[in-house]
Image (cartoon, grey):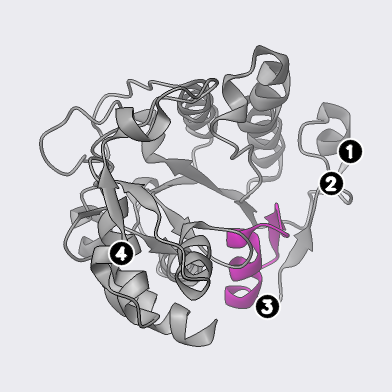
Amino acid sequence: MTALILGANGQLGRALQREFPDAVALDRSKLDVTDREAVRDYPWADVDLVLNAAAWTAVDAAEDPANLTAVRAANVDAVGHLARAVRTCGATLVHVSSEYVFDGQHEGPHPEDWPAHPLSVYGKSKADGDVEAGHVTKHYIVRTTWVVGEGGNFVRTMAGLADRGISPNVVDDQIGRLTFADDLAAGIHHLVTTQAPFGTYNLTGDGDPVSWADVAAEVFAARGRSADDVGRVSTEEYFAGKTGIAPRPRNSVLDLARIKATGFAPRDWRDSLREYLAAL
């Protein structure tokens, strides 16, 4: 199998390179997926699998009207370019999506077929990108949440604050599960190698859903600080007086029954968190 990783320098892209060591890994300097002609002219003939981890992920910056064209180019147009190329060469497309396609009003874990109702510009772009990916017969749309990997992320930020003796206020009314990039890449590898039925799969860490403040408290405890050093505030309190903030879904929990039915067992996010912190 000849695999192609796009967005290779991101948190997931780096994890995918470890999971697919023989893949061709391309960052934007090597293939700008927002460039229709560049995608069209890439030598697709020998490509069997396209792993699309390229995306605009700056959720708040996406709300700036000046960025709208760039957001849509990365999260919608680029997926359309890839879908057309993949249909031509007959490859399988793996496209990574987000719980931001939902409004977070569902009372339980969101199943894969829950209707999209995004609250933000970013969420709308991801929902529209999913539609583009779905035009490929051989596709996996992998929907995930709260990704943690190499580079800047929430867990690293909280660990740094804990180590510096800072006691932050953290949002306590947005609920979800962490997803570690290596675990996400492993799940994608499982879908591809077991030839699971094509379609959409939720793929996050397993375990009890928690708030961002709960995650921060876990990190603080692991760094030798008291969990009580993390202040708990509402979303409204946290963003009071700030502008350009994207609305967040309050419920980011995704139903994992379908991915589990393929034989993949997502790791408990707490186990992954302990390993991640030990390696920092």
Q: Give the CA distance from mark 4 to mark 2.
A: 45 Å
- Residue found 26% across the figure and 35% down from its top: 250
Q: Nearer the viewer, residue 268 or 38?
A: 268
**Disc sitting over residue 41 in the figure:** 1
Three-letter code for the amino acid on which mark 2 is drawn: Leu
| Residue 34 sits in quarter | top right
Q: Secondary structure at mark 1?
A: helix
Residue labelled with disc 2:
31
Which corner quadrant holds the N terminus?
Answer: bottom right
Closer to the chain start, of discs 4 and 1, is 1
Three-letter code for the amino acid on which mark 1 is drawn: Asp
Q: Nearer the viewer, residue 269 or 214?
A: 214
| Residue 18 vertical position relative to residue 156 in the rendered view, above or below | below
- Residue found 62% across the figure and 73% down from its top: 20
Q: Is residue 146 left or right of residue 214?
A: right
Give the foreground label among 3 and 4.
Answer: 4
Mark 4 residue crowding within 10 angstroms, few (<14) / some (14–19) / many (20+): some
Q: Give the CA distance from mark 2 to mark 1.
A: 10 Å
Q: Are marks 3 and 4 in contact (CB under 8 Å)?
A: no
Residue labelled with disc 3:
21
Mark 3 residue crowding within 10 angstroms, few (<14) / some (14–19) / many (20+): few
Q: Nearer the viewer, residue 128 or 198?
A: 128
Closer to the chain start, of discs 4 and 2, is 2
Closer to the chain start, of discs 3 and 2, is 3
Residue labelled with disc 4:
229
- Residue found 54% across the figure and 33% down from its top: 59
